[in-house]
Amino acid sequence: MPTELEARVNVLEREMGEMRKVVLLGNGKPSLVAEVASIETELKDIKASLAKLNTGISRVVWLVLSSVIGQVLYAVFNKGA
């Protein structure tokens, strides 16, 4: 007959086995490992999209800034003529 400590160890081993199955294999849904990997992939895609957007916005800002500076210079030098 197992002691109380052995019974507790057996319960913990069973529960750990069940948790391992859920984490690695899933419980009717994708496993937690697969879910985390999927989320990481989505985050990488979002970061790449944000980097492209940031580059595009930077170009637009530089174009607008260049245009404004050009108009200011034109106005300054046009008044002197």
Image (cartoon, grey):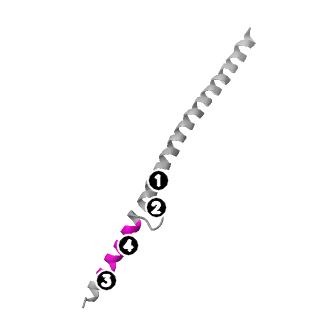
Contact flag, marks 4 and 2 (Cβ < 8 Å): no
Within the magenta stretch, is there residue 53?
Answer: no
Q: Are dots 3 and 4 in contact, CB under 8 Å? A: no
Residue holding disc 2: 30
Labels 1 and 2 touching (C-beta < 8 A): yes
User: Could you tell me which residue is drawn at 36 percent across and 76 percent down?
Assistant: 15
What's under tag 4, amino acid-wise? Glu
Disc 1 + disc 3, Cβ < 8 Å:
no
Q: Which amino acid, mark 2?
A: Pro
Residue 38 marker: 1
Q: Is residue 79 above or below residue 30?
A: above
Q: Which residues are magenta?
A: 9-22
Q: CA distance from mark 3 to mark 4?
A: 15 Å
Q: Which residue is mark 4?
A: 18
- Front residue of 65/80: it is 65
Q: Secondary structure at mark 3?
A: helix
Residue drawn where x is 28% and y is 88% of the image: 4
